[in-house]
Amino acid sequence: MKIHPSSDVQSSHIGAGTLVWQFCVILPNAKIGVNCNINAHCFIENDVVIGNNVTVKSGVYIWDGVVLEDGVFIGPNATFTNDKIPRSKQYPTQFAKTVVKKGASLGAGCVILPGIVIGENAMVGAGAVVTKDVADHTTVVGNPAKPIKERA
């Protein structure tokens, strides 16, 4: 594990071979697997599980309730959300669970609404706004995101 000195990593649950680059904040209960690459300017909240061999590009904030399974790729500035009815200083008793399944890729600048499941080896195009679950091996693009093809 290698953590850049400018990062604030409070979690002790980070696997061997994982790299954490500049200006990241990782809260104490976050769990990150082995051989991950957490690029600069990322924030990872407490109730987050990141599997093995995951790449999180710069500018990604991963909020409570998000699970990234093994081999996931998150493009730069992808946006996760976890509260369907956000209000200042009013928090749900539990945040919606969002799961990105094994081998899925999320393109730069996409938005993932709360409670969504992105299927195994699925692809979310850059800038897409995902409002519904994405099936395994499916590519979605647009706003709202719509399937364009199944992938092998």
Image: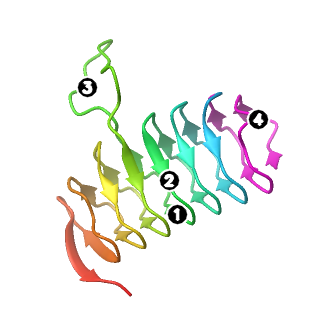
Q: Give the crowd class for mark 2: few <14, some 14-19, many >=20 residues within 10 Å.
A: many
Give the SS element for disc 4.
loop
Task: Indicate the position of residue 56 as horizontal and vertical percent values.
Answer: 57, 55
Q: Quadrant of residue 124?
A: bottom left
Task: Indicate the position of residue 102 as horizontal and vertical percent values.
Answer: 49, 66
Label 4–label 1 contact, CB within 8 A:
no
Q: Which mark is residue 16?
A: none
Q: Going 30% across and 75% down the picture, which residue do you hit?
A: 138
Indicate yes or no whether the magenta region holds residue 14: yes
The kind of residue on which mark 4 rests is Ser
Q: Over which residues does the magenta segment extend?
A: 1-27
Task: Indicate the position of residue 78 as horizontal and vertical percent values.
Answer: 42, 52
Task: Indicate the position of residue 58 as horizontal and vertical percent values.
Answer: 57, 51
Name the magenta segment's main secondary structure: loop
Q: Which mark is residue 86?
A: 3
Q: Which residue is mark 4?
A: 6
The kind of residue on which mark 1 rests is Val
- Which mark lies nearer to you, 4 or 1? 1
- Which mark lies nearer to you, 4 or 2? 2
Q: Which residue is mark 1?
A: 72
Label 4–label 2 contact, CB within 8 A:
no
Who comes first in sequence, dot 4 or dot 3? 4
Q: Using the numbered discs, state the Cα–Cα distance from disc 4 to disc 1 in whole angstroms.
A: 25 Å
Q: Which residue is mark 2?
A: 68
Q: Using the numbered discs, state the Cα–Cα distance from disc 3 to disc 1 in whole angstroms.
A: 27 Å
Rendered position, 41 above or below 101: above
Q: Using the numbered discs, state the Cα–Cα distance from disc 4 to disc 2 in whole angstroms.
A: 24 Å
Label 2–label 1 contact, CB within 8 A:
yes
The kind of residue on which mark 2 rests is Leu
